[in-house]
Amino acid sequence: MRAFDSYHPIVIFTYFCSTILFSMFFMHPIFLSISLASSILYLGFLKGFHNMKRTILISIPLFLIIAISNPIFSHRGVTPLFYINYNPITLESVIYGLSMAGMIVTVIFWFSCYNEVMTSDKFISLFGKISPSIALIISMTINTVPRMKRQIELITNSQKTLGMYVHSGSIIKRAKSSIRILSILITWALENAIDTADSMNARGYGLRGRTSHSLFKFKRNDFFLFSFIILLSALCVYGEMANYISFSYYPYISKINLSYFSFILYFSYLLLMTLPLVIEFKETIRWRLSISKI
Amino acid sequence: MQEDPNRKYKLNKKRFFFSVLILTIVIPIILLFGIKLFNDRRYNLISIIIAFLSCIPFFIRFESKRPKAREIMVIVVMASISVTSRIIFAPIPGFKPVTALTAITGIAFGPEAGFLTGAISALVSNMFFGQGPWTPFQMIAWGLLGFIAGVLSKFNLMKNKAFLILYSIFAGIFYSLIMDIWHVLSIDGLFTLEKYKIAIVAAIPFTIIYAVSNIFFLILLNKPIGEKLDRIKIKYGLIE
């Protein structure tokens, strides 16, 4: 069990909302690199660094496409490097393309972290309060998909005994048997669904005064972490509004602000982005300490 | 159990008010926010938020109807069939029956069910394939396609085979156009018509695959599945 996962879904969801939104929003190079580095570290922690190689390898072509296409399409900026067909390739647009590519890759990494931590049960328990019917539809759909896959196998096997093969024979015959399987599947699913619905009604679905069970409780720890995330996010937003961390790529690349307050902002952004790792680290140390006390 | 009609009316009114609020106030405010505050440079973020927000009025409307268990289950079945089919057809890029199944649901159970099936299929199938910034775009694209199919069938147009083919081609182009918005935005966060045109041209092979797969699956599946849905509708007295 990972320590950050045990927090209330609201806390986890807020955290990922703020990291993903900020990663897309802050194009400041320091902020971008902080976010990219922490997303890679966190994803490595979640999936194991060995399994992560594939995710990174897949994202390299995407990175290259975006990084290369920006200077080709955009000729803004004041420092031409060279010319292609009388169109200037500018230093600014090259750097902007690199940052943009880094941003997209970062967001994709954060989304993979999100997929690891924010499992569908957490997602549904969160939205069940806001929109119970939609959350119910989502949760039952997730549940039905694997059951359907199993049922497809069953139907395919029983159809085989009747001579309806999917994997061999002429294309027309294969298509015919596939459609027959689909048709049986749909009849089964619909009749089954009506049964489920009747059973739900029999147990009082939709009656007033029914409560719903939730696995997650909003504890004091959750409150502290939640306020901390909000505080750090507010600080970053304030920094942006007050122009401490404004940064522009066009027409020329602006200088990086190195005042005291901007360092506080960089640090708080770093803290926000590595928050789950910090929590895991803290818990591990606590665990080690309590073991050594014994 | 007797429902208090007044309470329901009030609830509907409140929820209707919310959807109007989102459409007429929240979205323009976000647009304005994007233009003024972010110096008109954050189209990607703004458009993801707007794509997601535009799904919400449909959800609110569904929620405010207080759907019965059977209505819920029909959408669950159709959404899970399209998710399963997307998983089965995953090896062939672009060739998916999701649009066709969404349209069939829209035709049989009305525009609202069509929208929900499309949007939920996108959301849930991405739980298997991986969520990303593209999820809201897929939700609104498939949702609207289901909605449009439902509206068209209200005018008895979807029984005509020629019209089904026209719809399939339209659906392929529509889906491609919406997803191209995201592809353009992911390049540099800015949206220009010039780049959009290039993206559309670059995506033509995919658009063709979408359209062909839509024609294939709609022509093939519309009649058998439609009949099954109609049968269920009559047998259990489901309302549209």
Image (cartoon, rainbow, N blue to C red):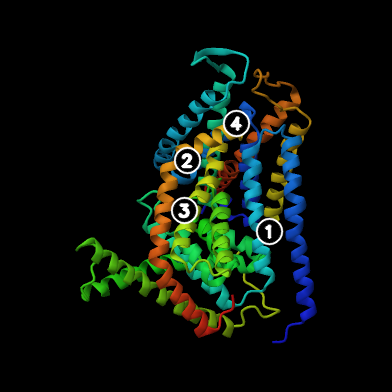
Which amino acid type is marked by label 3? Ile
- Label 2: state its secondary structure: helix
Name the residue carrying label 2.
A44
Q: Residues within 10 Å of mark 2 (few under 14, many from 20)?
A: some
**Disc 4 target residue:** A32
Q: Residue flagged by tag 1: what amino acid is it?
A: Lys
The residue marked by circle 2 belongs to what chain? Answer: A
Mark 4 or 1, nearer chain start: 4
Same chain for labels 4 and 1? Say yes or no. Answer: yes
Q: Position of residue B10 (x, y in %)?
A: 79, 72
Q: Which mark is in front, 2 or 4? A: 4
Q: CA distance from mark 4 to mark 1?
A: 33 Å
- Residue at the spot 54% in from the left edge and 52% down from the top edge: B138
| Mark 1 crowd level (few <14, some 14–19, many ≥20, 10 Å Cα) | few
Give above or below for B16 relative to A29. Answer: below
Chain of the residue under the numbered disc 4 shown in the image:
A
Q: Which mark is residue B169?
A: 3
Residue B60 placed where, x, y %? 68, 64
Seen from the viewer's position, the closer of residues A189 and B113 is: B113
Between B96 and A193, the one lying in front of the other is B96
Disc ID at residue A219: 1
Q: Amino acid at mark 4?
A: Leu
